[in-house]
Image: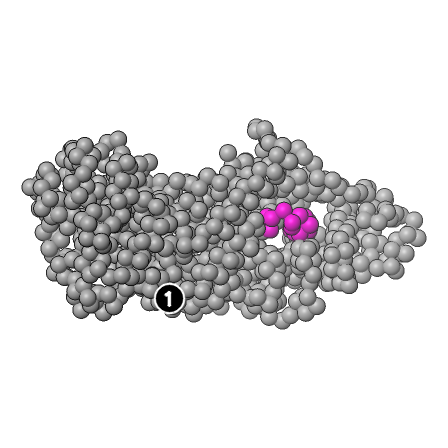
Amino acid sequence: MAQILAQILFSPTISVSKSREWISTKAHGISPIGKYSPAKNMASHNIPSTFVVGKDAKTLQACYGKPDYVHYVSTFKEAPLDEMDNRIKELVTEIKGLFNSMEDGEISPSAYDTAWVARISAIDGSGKPQFPQMVDWILHNQLPDGSWGEKHRFLACDRLLNTLSCLVTLAFWGIGSNQVSSGLYFLRKNTEGMIKEAFGHHQPKGFEMVFPVLLNEAKLLGLDFPYDLSIIQQMSEKWDSQLKKVSVEKLHSHPSTMLQCLEGIQEVVDWKNILKLQSKDGSFSGSPASTACVFMHTGDNKCLRFLTSLVKKFVDHVPSMYPVDIAERLRAVDSVERLGLESHFQTETKQAMDYVFQYWSERGIGFGRESLVPDIDITATAFRLLRTFGYTVSSDVLQNMKGEAEELCKLSANENSAGVIAMLSLYKCSQLNFPGENVMREIGASAKDYLTKSLQTENFSHSKAVKENLFQEVEYALSARWNRNMPRLMARNHIVAFNPDDLWLGKTLYRLPYASNDKYLELAKLDFNRIQASHRSEIQHIKRWYEDCNFPQLDFTRHREVAVYWTSSAVMFEPQYTACRLAYAKAGILAVITDDLYDNYATLHQAKLFNEALERWDPLVIDQLPEDMKIVFMGLYNTLTDISERAQEVQGRVDALPYLRQQWLHLFFSYTKEREWTERGYSPSLDEYRENAVVSIALGVTILTAIFCTGEILPDQILGKVDFRADFLNVVSLTGRLMNDLRTFQRERDLGELASFLQCYINEHPGCTEEEASNYMHGVNEHALCKLNYHFLMRADIPKSFRTLLFNTARVMNVVYRNEDSLSNAAEDLEDSIKKSLYEPVL
């Protein structure tokens, strides 16, 4: 480096600026570049609507030599950044407080379960309620229409169970005549319609078993109810049929979901025998209603202790299940992760997932630590989040739940929201699959089919009663898989779809207020917009660097500075990675320009001279090259020098420049080889093409240029590690090349290029059609992404920031080339993604 600087200093045609400023070649018209400060205002950009590849200078100038295609003008007034920062800190502190206060879980009241507990007679034999405050709660929490239940959301099954349960309890104690009259009026007026709705959609667990029992009890208590309705008769007949199907032996020998609704199958329960399936906390599957029913039949002290502990905590009511320590932690971490807030709560999410992992087993996991019966939704969510955060969990748990999932699939004709939510969770978790995990592919395919059919049913709209944006959530999940989507885009979508008032459905509707509330949503919007503002400042840096390099003068290349910067902001979006984003964007832009240089501008002789100049690291060599090639070389020369100097400040003993030069030279040799193939009309073998293509896609050089700038110290062995290069970096490059070739094959073939994955595969498989070759490539890409899942999630020997840089690069390639070559074609979908990520705030 010192020799090069000395040589340049004594050259009459080249001057050197001060430290950290850039070398300029006066004779070549290249202006010096100084230090930059991020600009605060957004820039305007022009957008060409089409892109056509051509070889002649006029065509290249018309199609390539245009400004970047993202054009956006601010139409909103952004809040002062210091105000945003202060409010973000306040919200982070408040949500951390929620995480630290979860204990056994916070959950909304259940009128249904409160009424069952309120029926328990005092153990002192006085004939009064054991928990009179429960009765008082019922008297004071009737809704204006005479019903009981979730007041902000109407769901037929929820209102029926809650209302009838409360009426039976009041009649049992002979109190609340006004409330009873009002409640009966509500039921007489609405029962038939609500039962039809409940039968048609989203019945909660055990509804068909529990509701007929409540009707019989109401009848015995003399409540004036339309028992002779044909729909009620049909329900009673169905209950009789279901009761006959209950295996009494299995009921008393194996924990099952029936433990959550024992009050609905009292006729077949052996009360002494059922105590063998009692949870350690004294409950039956965490259900207050089921536990109260068992106590009323057995007088079991453990049941009473459980119920008493609930009353002590909640004072005058009980929830639909408890504890919910597992469910609430998972829902809270899920909110944080999906809303893009993970960086604010690393300690809290680690503690929460450590807690969940402590109770994880291969048979699954339930709502609370004492749950004997796994829940599909909770288990699938736990599996996904545990893998996301690097815990070792086996897919055997999904094999164990496969039968129950298949039973859910059979319900697709009679759609219910609980099934949709469970299948959505299974579909999401199936995407974090590793090589060889066939069960995850099978479950993923079944879940996808179920969800696709559910979207097409008229009944799906009724799911709004449980989760208002469930349709949009399913639709988005099906549109792009986890490893084919970008965290920034996913976060924005979840922010838009996030409803802080979302409910969950057990036997009745319930809320988990510590896991979903207004604070999460407010923080997510502020954080997204704050990061977006930082990214816009970085765009100004990139545009200034681009102009100072004189790149806008180049007519042979695609001008994609904002689009390429977007990829860097999508790959590493957090505030601490500014240096990494800038290095990644500059490397990506240089890769685009040099790709076009070797493909469309330089002769083969000029390309080899360009290689020689880089290999010798000598700007004097470029005197023999055209002006445009001089501009490109000096931009590369100065940029790599600057990045290496900045990297050395962080890495200390590591001198990045020799390494970076070698990587870029390796890339240019691959470009040169492709140019030679084209000029010779040579079609390489598939293996020969692949070896070169994973280099020429330029993802390796982009990543390895930026990897020095993550802020983390590079371990001595990481860059030279064989499995890091071959099994991680090369697989990232492979998936990028596959997707690129799939979308550019026809265009490049028309230009006379014979080397592509598709063409090489067809050449080696005579008679193979383009469709068959395309399917083969999709299969290879799928396998590559599966391997990347493992490397990203489980390679603890590689720092997380490096894994993220690699994995998200593969993801962004699958986004850019999802439907077409969006980068070259100025595609509307990519433009829309860029605007949503960088310019349009979440309001």
Q: Which amino acid is tagged 1? A: Val
- Per the image, label 1 sits on a secondary structure element best described as helix
142 over 721 or under it: above or below: above
Q: Main secondary structure of the magenta part?
A: helix
36 over 645 or under it: above or below: above
Furthest residue in direction bottom, as rendered: 722
Position of residue 784 measured from the top left corner of the image (x, y, whole percent): 50, 63
Check if residue 582 falls in the magenta segment.
Answer: yes
Position of residue 439 measured from the top left corner of the image (x, y, whole percent): 37, 66
x 11%, y 56%: residue: 241
Residue 230, located in which quarter of the rendered image?
A: top left
Q: Nearer the viewer, residue 723 or 548?
A: 723
Check if residue 699 falls in the magenta segment.
Answer: no
Q: Which residue is mark 1?
A: 397
Query: Magenta stretch?
Result: 572-589
Position of residue 507 measured from the top left corner of the image (x, y, whole percent): 27, 50
Q: Quadrant of the N terminus?
A: bottom right
Can residue 137 be seen?
Answer: yes
Residue 90 relative to residue 665: left or right: left
Can residue 668 be seen?
Answer: no
Residue 367, located in which quarter of the rendered image?
A: bottom left
x 90%, y 56%: residue: 6
Position of residue 723 measured from the top left corner of the image (x, y, whole percent): 60, 70
x 44%, y 46%: residue: 514
Q: Nearer the viewer, residue 99 or 711?
A: 99
